[in-house]
Image: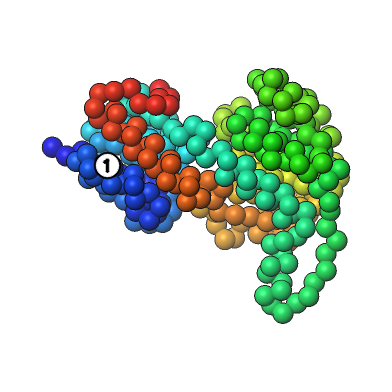
Amino acid sequence: MAKKVLVTATNYSTYCSAAKALLEENGVEVIENPYGRPMTRDELLTVVGDIDGVVVGVDTWNEKIFAHAPKLRAMARFGVGVDNIDLAAAKAHGIQVTNAKGMNSNPVAELTVGLILSTLRNVPAFNASIREGKWDRFMGRDLAGMTVGLLGFGDIAQRVAKKLSGFDVSICAYDLYPNLEKARELNVKMVSMEEALHRADVVCMHLPSLPATHHIMDAQTFGMMKDGSYFINTARGALVDETALAQALRSGKLTAAAIDVFDQEPVRRDNPLFALPNLFATPHTAAETYDTYHNVGLATARQLLDVFAGKKPNNLLN
């Protein structure tokens, strides 16, 4: 009997046609997310009862879903972070979970640098105002001469450091398990989180989303940052207390912030952050490039096929 794979990552046919073809060539029926956004629990419950595998986007997968998915044996996260998947519950149900470790690091790092530059020069606001016939002025800041602080020093942060190496900046980083060799190679000074916040003109968030890091950026930690500094988050929304971020932007503690992620996604249009002119946002799109979707699509398809064939897949997490 043909295997069935649900794809909750969006735009699969459009951007992952090679991966879809690979699955279908191996006798797999592909069922795609029709909503163009993360699927809700009720939406998942209507389809999970008859699926063997999932290419997982950012929807939530836990015991309440697994209990209704008796055939499910493989989940391939279309990305790296798996905070939306209960790994222990999946293992208890005999479900193998994989991710695409390292495969989306470059586009996330590129967007991080792009957001830094756009924020320092007010690019999003200029783009909006000039379309309204305005000819606004804004005194921006040079990135050269600034200190950039990286919270987290994994693959993405290391790539950010490398890309910033030509911008004449100083870079410091905090990580619970610092890669000192890589820090020396990239001319990055490893410091405590408190020192990174105190020293940096621009703070970039690259920590993993864990219970221990939930809302790690709160009123206290934003208060440690330089007056007039900048905050960039392309990691996870759960790392930031949005009420504290809004207050830091209103008070002038932060000149501006640029974020690709929110505590609740999709974000509501009435989110208080959107009332602030010095908050720039993108819709969790850091990894979305043609190249990344093609490569991650093929990798996740192969992981599912390996599980179906009784082989150990790459990047098995549980």
Residue pictured at 43% horizontal, 41% vertical? 295
Q: Decide if residue 25 is in sight here.
A: yes
Residue pictured at 56% horizontal, 30% vertical? 210
Quadrant of the image containing the C terminus:
top left
Residue closest to the eye, 110 or 236: 110
Residue pictured at 28% horizontal, 33% vertical? 305
Binning the other alpha carbons within 10 Å of mark 1 as few (below 14), some (14 to 19) or many (20 upward) gives many
Instruction: In the displayed orientation, state which residue is furthest to the left.
Output: 1
Q: Is residue 128 left or right of residue 106?
A: right
Give the color scheme: rainbow, by chain, secondary structure or one colour.
rainbow
Where residue 51 sits in the image (x, y, percent)?
Answer: 25, 39
Secondary structure at badge 1 equals helix
Q: Is residue 213 left or right of residue 251?
A: left
Numbered circles on residues, count: 1
Give above or below for 24 relative to 128: above
Q: Is residue 135 left or right of residue 72?
A: right
Residue closest to the eye, 201 or 250: 201
Where residue 235 sits in the image (x, y, percent)?
Answer: 60, 40
Residue pictured at 66% horizontal, 29% vertical? 153
Quadrant of the image containing the N terminus:
top left
Q: Is residue 122 left or right of residue 39?
A: right
Where residue 5 sits in the image (x, y, percent)?
Answer: 27, 41
Give above or below for 188 relative to 181: below
Which image quadrant for residue 48? top left
Give the residue at mark 1: 23
Residue closest to the eye, 109 or 80: 109
Where residue 94 sits in the image (x, y, percent)?
Answer: 30, 24
The residue under label 1 is which amino acid type?
Leu
Q: Decide if residue 88 is in sight here.
A: no
